[in-house]
Amino acid sequence: MAHIIIFASSKGGAGKTTVVANLGVAMAQLGQNVVLLDADIMMANLGLLLGLEEQKVTLHDVLAGGAKLSGAISSGPEGVKVVPSGISLEGIQRAKLDRLKKVVSELAKKFKFLLIDAPSGLDRDAITALTMAEKIVLVATPDIVALSNAFKTKLIAERLNVKPIGTVITRATGRNVDISHEGIKSTLELPVLATIPEDPELRRSAALGEPVVTHSPKSPSAKEFKKLAATLVKISAAR
Ligand SMILES: Nc1ncnc2c1ncn2[C@@H]1O[C@H](COP(=O)(O)OP(=O)(O)O)[C@@H](O)[C@H]1O
Ligand SMILES: [Mg+2]
């Protein structure tokens, strides 16, 4: 059975998509059988970060009922498998999100790790995506608002029987305005799996449609993504 892990945060711009893209590529580099699913139907950009924006068949087409899932799985950097979502003005009708469940269970049969990029917030789409997962990683910037929202997300996940396994702190400045690692750990009562620094290399590589872990492997954020990949593989093996 696959490890189905959703990466969620209450607000956009926290770095969820960046984390899922880079973590996925770093796990593929470790030889893991991993697939990434863009469940942010309305603001899809996982494909964009991995240079797959030209892909013809996307999750949109599968959810709309016109395409097979196998046609929507593509290969990204380092061979990581990705199911991108399309960018369409009309989006996807909400009712069709129900089909997402079938997509998730099909992927779970084929892969060891299924990492889901969640929509921001806690609206219906986000909750729907959350219910598909087995475990959740909270993605939060080190500030009080993000932390408070991460706490709410944790409570909702628990109510939905999705197990919180840890927090990834993103966009850390290293200055003392950031809430400390210890503060975040004790407030959320969860281990901090990684602290990704604010890193201009991330924007540079994103603009090229490349993950920082391959474009700039020695950059501070790339090093943290690689450590995070090793950590996630390790804690998953202990299950
Ligand atoms: N650690 C970081 N350092 C610098 N920029 C970052 C970092 N994490 C994310 N970003 C940038 O912030 C923007 C939003 O990130 P994204 O991953 O799309 O967030 P989300 O998916 O949570 O909305 C992107 O332009 C991304 O390149
Ligand atoms: Mg995103």
Image: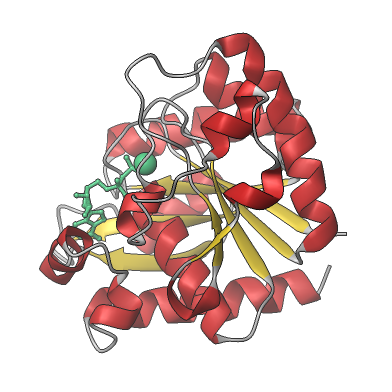
Does residue 7 appear in this view?
Answer: yes
Q: Position of residue 68 (x, y in %)?
A: 70, 40
The residue depicted at 26 percent of the width and 43 percent of the height is 143
Direction from residue 192 to residue 14 in the image, left or right: left
Report the number of discs. 0
Q: Quadrant of the C terminus?
A: bottom right
Q: Position of residue 223 (x, y in %)?
A: 34, 83
Does residue 182 appear in this view?
Answer: no
Q: Position of residue 33 (x, y in %)?
A: 69, 73
Relative to 63, does residue 106 appear above or below in the rendering? below
The residue depicted at 56 percent of the width and 31 percent of the height is 61
Q: Quadrant of residue 28?
A: bottom right
Relative to 8, does residue 159 appear above or below in the rendering? above
The residue depicted at 59 percent of the width and 48 percent of the height is 72
Q: How is the image coloured?
A: secondary structure
Direction from residue 63 to residue 106 in the image, left or right: right
Seen from the viewer's position, the closer of residues 84 and 3 is 84
Q: Position of residue 105 (x, y in %)?
A: 81, 43
Seen from the viewer's position, the closer of residues 134 and 47 is 47
Seen from the viewer's position, the closer of residues 181 and 70 is 70
